[in-house]
Image (cartoon, rainbow, N blue to C red):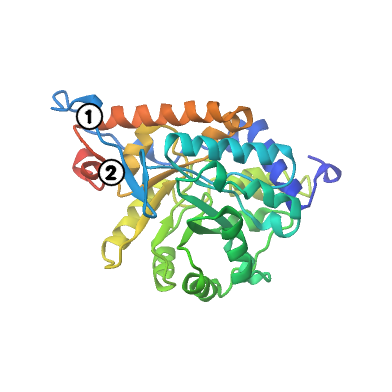
Amino acid sequence: MSKDSVDRSVAGRKLEHIRAIQSDPQVERRASGFDQISLTHRALPELDFDQIDTTCTFLGKPLSFPMLISSMTGGSGEECLQLNRNLAIAAQETGVAMAVGSQRVMFTNRDAAASFDLRALAPDVPLLANIGAVQLNKGFSLKHCRAAVDVLKADALYLHLNPLQEAVQPEGDRNFSDLTSKIAQITHDLDVPVILKEVGSGLSQADINLGLTAGISHFDVAGRGGTSWSRIEYHRRSDDDDDLGLVFQDWGLTTVESLIGARETLSHYQRKTTLIASGGIRNGVDMAKSVILGADLCGVAAPFLEAAQDSSDSVVRKIRKFQKEFITAMFLLGTANVQSLQGNTSLIR
């Protein structure tokens, strides 16, 4: 990509990210660790497939099964607007949660706010707002976080952590100093829960512990092995000789590694916590493995992108496919409900 073709605006950046995902199959790294986990098949599950209960709750609201449509995009223009609306309609129809992409764009482009105004389309499911935590070092404050929550009428706010992406990005914000104290203040003052989230390199146990000290009770590990944002930013490089995004395209903790570490850390904590698995979850079997490793919820993004560009019905079909795969895995493991699956590492062989 030539320097002249790159749009350095926040809004333009979001469309460039989508184009990179569509044009480069290797953005999908296929190495989240799930293939290394084998589960114990039950030939006599003693279950009625049609009676398996996949329901759960998240942020006090019921879900049909433990799925979250993870953050993808948002911004001005019909493409971003329709994409988010299709996702929201599908989330409502299937009874799953949804998170929007970074809302920073709505503070530089007023028209972008419309792509985050989704509550009327998804009145009953959890919706998550989203701000980059590093923006707290760039002038963002409680006011911005509240505005992000308000436009979506969100149930919680993602504060996403993306140091690798910012380090590789041509216009990246790289000052991550003293963020924990600022996150703690937002967590204390905001009217909805804050969720700490990586974007594809995983949360370490040290990160989880820092989050806990900041008052965070909800974590999304977003591990390595799915979409590589480092490789995506490589496509937006200013210098053709700059290969930093490729060098670091597989940097970080895999989703499985991050999940195991996070659950170990959270198991010693008295306060009720929520653990979200995301990063390379590509089918219902990956979801089942995540829940076995201790996840309360599974976030999925890339598999829904093409469907969301088509229609809400296409997204619904994708979600239903994940759900059928998840139920089938539960049936073949002899687990009648999500509670009997969660944290049940005896199912791993």
| Residue in view at x 29 percent, y 30 percent | 329
Amino acid of disc 2: Ile
| Residue in view at x 36 percent, y 56 percent | 274
Q: Is residue 163 visible?
A: no
Q: N-terminal of the two: label 2 or label 1?
A: 1
| Residue in view at x 70 percent, y 54 percent | 105
Residue 214, x across and y down, in percent:
44, 72
Q: Quadrant location of residue 81?
A: top right
Going by the image, does 45 lie left or right of 170? left
Going by the image, does 75 lie left or right of 43? right
Going by the image, does 59 lie left or right of 19? left
Q: Quadrant location of residue 140?
A: bottom right
Note whether 96 is above or below 140 in the view shown: above
Secondary structure beneath dot 2 equals helix
Secondary structure beneath dot 1 equals helix
Mark 2 Cα shell of 10 Å, populated few (<14), some (14-19), many (≥20): many
Residue 123, x across and y down, in percent:
49, 45
Judge depth for marks 2 and 1 and give the one in front: 1
Residue 321, x across and y down, in percent:
42, 26
Dot 1 corresponds to which residue? 51
Q: What is the number of the mark on residue 34?
A: none
Q: Of residues 148 and 30, which is closer to you in this image?
A: 148
Amino acid of disc 1: Gln
Going by the image, does 276 lie left or right of 135? left
- The C terminus - image quarter: top left
- The N terminus - image quarter: top right
Callout 2 touching callout 1 (CB < 8 Å): no
Q: Quadrant location of residue 6?
A: top right
Q: Of residues 346 and 273, which is closer to you in this image?
A: 273
Q: Is residue 56 visible?
A: yes
Dot 2 corresponds to which residue? 292
